[in-house]
Image: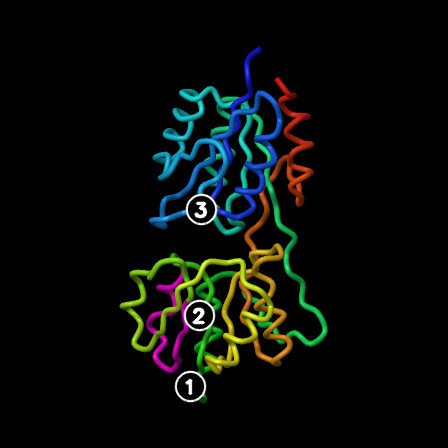
């Protein structure tokens, strides 16, 4: 009996959990793709494809060469390019695709959020808020987004990541903290207090793991600049790992 080859587009903790659950289904063979931006990534169960595909055509070639029966998109909500490429390849080859979507964070009583549509707007908002006094900023927008803030001189930045980002050199005043999430509420509260943070800049990545810094900010009454999520992809989607498993079984069966 032939197995089912499942490609998980990963790079998130969600992808690791999905790979673990799907690997329990008999005859499911799991391949998880990782972007390769960190030297020591957390490796999922099953095979790992580390590095990009080479655009749309490269992804199509990969799907054909590995006889992929199902694509599970578990990439970061802001990883729009790979999502677009995956949808294109899915349509070209008639390979079904399922999107894992995290529940977005919603502002609640006590939050002091400044909502913006993209990172340039977040940068402009920070310039506006720091125009009258120097702010200490906890900048949590990911490696690729750091450059938008490097020329803001009237702020001191605290940047946390798994590995030291090359963009750090472009900041006139920045401190790097090594760390791999998820981080507890107590951890985030302690960091904000010890570093004497005035404001946080972050993306609305959704899910539980990144929300603790927002809860800590609410506790301390700190303002947060929040970048809204891009529009969600069309097609089959689910906000739970159990739901992804159910959809997978509906799309391709068990064998």
Instruction: Look at mark 3 in the image and give the residue it sits on.
Output: 42
Relative height, residue 21 to residue 41 (above, below): above
Secondary structure found at label 2: helix
Q: Which mark is residue 110?
A: none
Q: In the image, what residue occupies the spot 51% across and 29% down? A: 30
Instruction: Look at mark 1 in the image and give the residue it sits on.
Output: 134
Report x, y in % for residue 71: 53, 31
Q: In the image, what residue occupies the spot 58% across and 58% down? A: 209
The mark lying in front, picked from 3 and 1, is 3
Looking at the image, tell me whether mark 2 or mark 1 is earlier in sequence order: 2
Relative height, residue 152 to residue 116 (above, below): below
Q: In the image, is residue 31 part of the stretch drawn in magenta?
A: no
Q: In the orientation shown, which residue stands out farthest toward the right?
A: 109
Secondary structure found at label 1: loop
Marks 3 and 2, how far apart at CA = 31 Å
Quadrant of the frame with the N terminus: top right
Judged left or right of residue 140, residue 70 is right
Label 1 neighbourhood size at 10 Å, few (<14), some (14-19), many (20+)? some
Report x, y in % for residue 134: 42, 86
Q: Which mark is residue 123?
A: 2
Looking at the image, tell me whether mark 3 or mark 1 is earlier in sequence order: 3
State which region is magenta: 145-159
Q: In the image, is residue 153 part of the stretch drawn in magenta?
A: yes
Q: Quadrant of residue 74?
A: top right
Secondary structure found at label 3: loop
């Amino acid at each position: 009996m032939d197995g089912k080859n499942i490609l998980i587009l990963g790079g998130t903790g969600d992808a690791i959990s999905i790979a673990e659950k799907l690997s329990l289904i008999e005859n499911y063979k799991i391949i998880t793709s990782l972007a390769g931006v960190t030297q020591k990534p957390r490796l999922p169960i099953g095979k790992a494809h580390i590095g990009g595909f080479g655009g749309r055509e490269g992804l199509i070639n990969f799907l054909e060469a590995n006889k992929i029966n199902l694509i599970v998109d578990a990439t970061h909500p802001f990883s729009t390019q790979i999502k677009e490429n995956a949808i294109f390849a899915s349509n070209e080859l008639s390979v079904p695709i399922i999107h894992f979507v995290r529940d977005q964070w919603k502002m609640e009583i006590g939050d002091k959020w400044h909502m913006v549509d993209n990172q340039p707007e977040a940068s402009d908002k920070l310039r506006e808020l720091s125009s009258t006094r120097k702010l200490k900023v906890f900048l949590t927008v990911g490696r690729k987004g750091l450059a938008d803030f490097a020329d803001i001189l009237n702020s001191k930045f605290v940047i946390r990541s798994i590995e030291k980002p090359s963009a750090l050199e472009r900041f006139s005043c920045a401190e790097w903290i090594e760390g791999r999430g998820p981080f507890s509420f107590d951890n985030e509260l302690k960091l904000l207090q010890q570093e004497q943070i005035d404001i946080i800049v972050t993306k609305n990545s959704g899910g539980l793991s990144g929300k603790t810094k927002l809860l800590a900010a609410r506790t301390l009454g700190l303002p947060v600049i929040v970048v809204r999520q891009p529009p969600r992809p069309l097609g089959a989607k689910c906000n739970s790992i159990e739901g992804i498993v159910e959809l997978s079984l509906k799309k391709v069966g068990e064998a």
